[in-house]
Image (cartoon, rainbow, N blue to C red):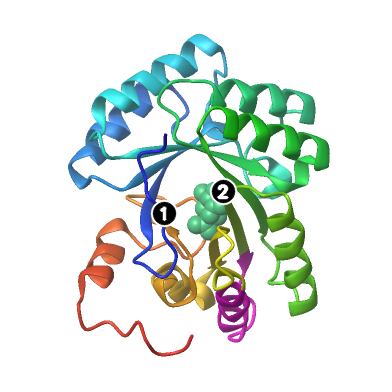
Amino acid sequence: MSKIQLKAFAPPKICVPVMSESPEKVVEFCSMLAPLAPDCVEWRLDYTADLSEEALRYSLDEMNRLLPDETAILATYRTKYEGGEGDLLPVDYRILVEWLIVQDGIDLIDIELAQGDESVAQLIRRAKENQVTSVLSYHNFSETPDNVHLNELLYTMTLKKPDVVKIATMGINKSDYPRLAKLVKKWSSRNDGSLFIALVMGELGQMSRLEGEKFGSVMTFARVDKGSAPGQYTIEEVRNYLENASRDINKEV
Ligand SMILES: O=C1C[C@@](O)(C(=O)O)C[C@@H](O)[C@@H]1O
């Protein structure tokens, strides 16, 4: 059972990426991060040099030991194709993600849409069997596709029935954020149990990282030092915004 309760049209949960190359660096980073008590950390395994089970198990145990009990762990292996550092072959990606799903201490698992129908279906099924929250993800670092394409994506992704559909696209035009937000709001308002994370990367999409409550995005990613995507605010900046009671959550995006 995941520690984190994700809810649409509520303040988004804050997730901080851990992009450490060794277990020692994981310990160093999580010791520094613990007092900030984020709702979630994203363990970016594509930054990890040693993917042996022993090294990974050690890092995971240390993360769970150092971070507050309430902080959930999202495990992500982001491939180069999706803008990350990872170059595992699809078969090895699937083995790694299946292994992560059955580990004690993992609350959420990222599954890339680009891994193909069969892998995606299998990994979502495995996550469900193990009560791990599945986050089906799509990234586009060059643009925010047009509405027809975005609707198709949202349709394809929700059909696969993950717990959460995550879309992160690059903001090239001012209209990209309001456009994506309007579509996601429509999809999240259907009340069929699907949850969404929608982020527009880069300067033009920065408000998407703060205003999730307006359009139904349940989580936002924030940095401590270096970020894992363009446009990320620091955890303090996001918290300050979310804790400001006078922020306008009613106005349309
Ligand atoms: O999918 C996402 C969202 C993200 O790309 C962002 O834009 O904040 C950051 C990634 O670390 C994460 O896996």
Q: Nearer the viewer, residue 162 or 116?
A: 162
Q: Which residues are magenta?
A: 169-186
Image check: 225 left or right of 51? left
Q: What residue did someone put label 2 on?
A: 163
Q: Amino acid at mark 2?
A: Asp
- The answer to whether the residue labelled 1 contacts the one labelled 2, judged by CB atoms less than 8 Å apart, is yes
Task: Give the residue displayed 63% in from the left and 68% down from the top.
Answer: 170
User: The disc labelled 1 sits on which kind of residue?
Assistant: Leu
Res 120 → quadrant? top right
Can you say whether 133 is above or below 159 in the image?
above
List x then y, in percent, for residue 74.
46, 39
User: For the residues marked 1 and 2, what is the alpha-carbon distance in whole angstroms?
Assistant: 10 Å
Location of residue 8 in the rendering, given as x and y in whole percent from the top left corner: 44, 65
Nearest to the observer: residue 185 or residue 112: 185
Q: Which residue is mark 1?
A: 6
Q: Residues within 10 Å of mark 2 (few under 14, many from 20)?
A: many
Q: Quadrant of residue 46?
A: top right
